[in-house]
Image (tube, grey):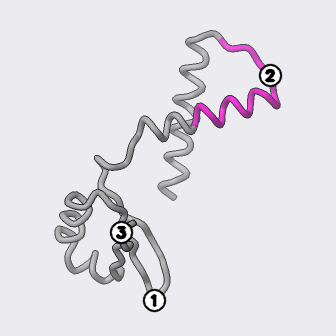
Amino acid sequence: MAAPIIRSSTDIRRDYNGIEALAKETGQPIYLTKNGRASLVVIDAATFDYDQYVGLMIDEAIEHNKRHPQTYTAEEAKVEIRKRVAERLADDEL
């Protein structure tokens, strides 16, 4: 396993393009530190697998439905999944 890529939060302010290029080149998450402590993780958008994220949301929905059975039409299920993904993405942005 490769060593993690760690940069200070100052690096992203001073050299955004360099951090972006590093993320694209390596496909690895870049851990940003602030005052010597982990603060954020940056990853190239192409590396972030949206389909895998949606798959995790579907798994979560299946577990939820086991605890709270409810029947949806296919269209209702699509709407509900899209709603939950949008909510989760909005939460992640906070």
Identify the residue under disc 2: 69
Identify the residue under disc 1: 36
Identify the residue under disc 3: 2
List the single residue furthest toward the front.
1
The answer to which of 13 and 40 lies nearer the viewer is: 40
Q: Does 43 sit left or right of 14 as displayed? A: right
Q: Amino acid at mark 2?
A: Pro
Q: Is residue 25 above or below residue 45?
A: below
Q: Is residue 15 above or below residue 67?
A: below
Marks 2/1: CA–CA distance: 47 Å
Query: Which of pointers 3 and 2 indicates the residue nearer the eye?
Result: 3
Of label 2 and label 1, which has the lower sequence position? 1
Local SS, label 2:
loop
Q: Quadrant of residue 81 in the image?
A: top right
Give the residue at x 48% y 78%: 38
Q: Residues within 10 Å of mark 2 (few under 14, many from 20)?
A: few
Q: Position of residue 74 (x, y in %)?
A: 58, 11
Q: Main secondary structure of the magenta part?
A: helix
Q: Position of residue 43 (x, y in %)?
A: 35, 59
Q: Which mark is residue 18?
A: none
The answer to which of 14 and 25 lies nearer the viewer is: 25
Q: Position of residue 35 (x, y in %)?
A: 45, 89
Q: Quadrant of residue 73 in the image?
A: top right
Local SS, label 3:
loop
Q: Is residue 92 above or below residue 57?
A: below
Local SS, label 1:
loop
Residue range in magenta is 57-72
